[in-house]
Amino acid sequence: MRPLIARVADIFGPDGVLAQRLPQFELREGQARMAEAVARTLEPDAESRSNLLAVEAGTGTGKTLAYLIPAALSGQKVIVSTNTINLQEQILAKEIPFLIEHLVPTLAALCVKGRQNYLCLYRWHQFCAAPQGRLFGNSEEVAAISDWLTTTATGDRAELEWLADDSPLWQRITATTSQCLGSQCPESGDCFLNLLRKKAAKAQLLVVNHHLFFSDLALRRFGHAEVLPRYESVIFDEAHHLENVATRYFGATISHYQLADLAADIEALAESDLSGRDRQKTLQLARALTVQSEQFLHLFPKERGRFALAPFIESCREWGPAKEALSEALLSLTEQAEMLLPLSETWGGMLRRGEELLRTLEIITNDHDSRHVYWYERRDKTVALAASPIEVAAELREALYPEVKSAVFTSATLTTASTFTYFTSRLGLPDSTETLVVDTPFDYQNRTLLYVPPNSFPEPNQPAFAPAANRTLAELVRLSNGRALLLFTSISAMQRAAETLRLELPYPLLVQGEAPRPKLLERFTTDTHSVLLAVASFWEGVDVPGESLSAVIIDKLPFEVPSDPVIMARVEKMREEGANPFVEFQIPRAILMLRQGVGRLMRTATDRGLLAILDVRLFTKQYGRLFRQSLPPTPVTRNLADVQTFFAGK
């Protein structure tokens, strides 16, 4: 046995460090198998092995330590990439201190977040000097940040617990890649990001999120300066998100907000740095770009969502002149920034931003090719145009896999109908990729029950479904005595259910959108008889152990409505290639989403509760078998009386 594998096996063994030093440690055969598989993948001198590993590790397996310990012991520079900041912070606050105290005293680990999490000193000073600054933050907020800057060593907004997630003030004083002036910035010596990069270069273990990782990978691929230091291996936790994140960063996007922000930054710089004709002309050009970007925004329909770009262009008579006017305004301002380069290095950053926006605008509106899908997204106050790759498999095979010694992919949900085929094909992983399934240690057989209505229940596409589903929801919640998470596939279905349940139930009803997510979860956790109704993001990442969550009820199988331009393009491409997109793409995506939702119920070994899916297609359609094969080993009932007996026996 190779040295790393042997040491890892000993650590996870019955007499190992974990058994001796980790409070409440339970010997888990699956956790040990995963740790040894990760060690085998990372082993630097290994022969005849795959350097790629995909592990499905069910809730409660202890997968975080199973990959962190081999990574820390490998001696390699390893990136650990997660989908959420919450998991990043858990790793840094909980697991890393344990490793340093008991296993690797010299381990240098660092959390690196996306640049929007760090204050930009240059933009802060510009903000404070500009008279319009008070529009974006009240005097108390500005004073609090001024005081914080005298003590902070990181510039990380996480230290500002009082700051709202959507703070307009923070948006003005942080810097995206396109806004950064780089080495030309007068604050580069004290820049929090530059100081962070120096620390990151010395660390062995870097904990990042997927967005930052793929932002860096895309920059490397296109020959730009990298965000992260060079690394040897990477471990992806919450890896089921990778295709969506990679799609974003291997494409191109431009928004009305970016254009308006460039104009505002140049206007502020002109006010503080220029005088005479230079100042007057620059202000005039910046304001012209602001006007043109606003006019461009108003071309697009008010309806929120994602839509194909080509049909809109064909139907919009004003498109050609408006796009040309926007390009000219952006070009004129960029040329002015170039003229001002001799006056200050700061104008170099403005020039680079303008040139990048011009290139992106041309790529998305003119240079169409069959490998990309072109679309726009309407939001509340802005519109974004994008070009996304229809497939990311080839991009990953070229940009990622050959560039690392090893890569590990793990999540509680990677398989569909007991195979990794969908996951590996979407990410372009070769057939030689090692795979491993580590089942959850939780006792689903004796501690859970799955309810599916009888076959006489209406199917979701029938008019009678919504009233029948809402009546059943009310009955199930009464049987569970509240304590229920209700997950919906659409906002409209959630809102209709909320209207009905408010009249039917005596329990507090918490509805997504009526309060911030953290506040909803806090109240749901503390009020043990409340009911939480939610969509989208609540299907995963909700961790409410104990009595407060005793039932997870899902209205129907979460098939996506194929209106998203990227999904539509992928479906059409598979159809053109002779594949069956429903079986090979849409069903697996729905299975993974369903598994995430179902996974909200059992968070600890002592949890107990009901799963309910109000969709008879689990039994009436042939594909229902694939969904049932992908669910935990839970006893199934079609009878509400069994649900009553289940809760009565608690």
Image (spheres, grey):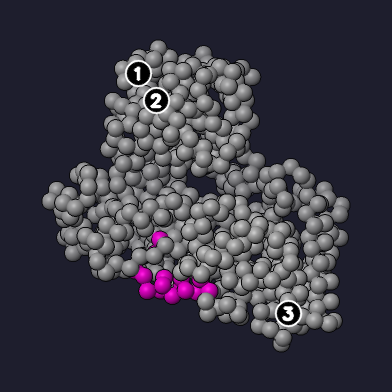
Q: What residue type is labelled 1?
A: Phe
Label 3: how many Cα within 10 Å (few below 14, some 14–19, many 20+) = few
Q: What residue type is labelled 2?
A: Leu
Q: Mark 1 points at which residue?
A: 646
| Quarter containing the N terminus | bottom left
Q: Is residue 147 visible?
A: yes
Q: What residue type is labelled 3?
A: Asp
Mark-to-mark CA distance, 2 and 1: 8 Å
Write the residue at 59% across / 29% down.
494
State the residue lying farthest toward the bottom: 342
**Helix, strand or loop for disc 3:** helix
| Residue 610, numbered label | 2
Q: Where is residue 375 in the image (x, y as percent from the top left)?
A: 69, 52
| Labels 3 and 1: the sequence-earlier one | 3
Q: In which quarter of the image is residue 452?
A: top left
Tags 2 and 3 touching, CB below 8 Å: no
Say above or below: 384 vs 147: above
Say above or below: 186 vs 30: below
State the predominant SS element of the stretch in magenta: helix
As for residue 204 lying within the magenta part, the answer is: yes
Tags 3 and 1 touching, CB below 8 Å: no
Q: Can residue 588 be seen in this view?
A: no
Write the residue at 49% across / 28% down.
531
3 or 1: mark nearer the eye: 3
The magenta segment is 191-207
Write the residue at 55% across / 78% down.
188
From the viewer's side, name the closer residue of 453 and 420: 453
